[in-house]
Amino acid sequence: MKRKFTKIGNSWAMLFTKTMLEMLDINPENEQVEIEFDKKKLVMEKVKNEN
């Protein structure tokens, strides 16, 4: 899947579709992700709820 970046102020953003978030099982309204870099790859993982 290819995605383009969108300019927002002085930053760049990548929009995630509802389908993409569903595939990742991420609810952006109440969950966070952790982002790591592995060489030239971006790795995003949902933060597990500690409750």
Image (tube, helix red, strand yellow):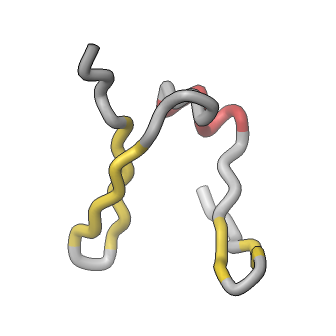
Q: Nearer the viewer, residue 40 or 50?
A: 50
The C terminus lies in quadrant: top left
Could you tell me which residue is drawn at 29 percent across and 27 percent down?
A: 48
Furthest toward the front, the residue is 51
Q: Is residue 48 left or right of residue 44?
A: left
x and y percent of residue 25 in the render? 49, 25
x and y percent of residue 36 in the render? 28, 61
Furthest toward the bottom, the residue is 10
Q: Is residue 34 left or right of residue 32?
A: left
Q: Kindly indicate the quadrant of the structure image that contains residue 15.
A: bottom right
The N terminus lies in quadrant: bottom right
x and y percent of residue 27 in the render? 57, 28
Q: Kindly indicate the quadrant of the structure image that contains residue 6.
A: bottom right
Could you tell me which residue is drawn at 76 percent across and 75 percent down?
A: 8
Q: Nearer the viewer, residue 48 or 24?
A: 48
Could you tell me which residue is drawn at 35 percent across and 57 percent down?
A: 35
Could you tell me which residue is drawn at 41 percent across and 44 percent down?
A: 33
Q: Nearer the viewer, residue 13 or 3?
A: 13
Q: Kindly indicate the quadrant of the structure image that contains residue 20.
A: top right
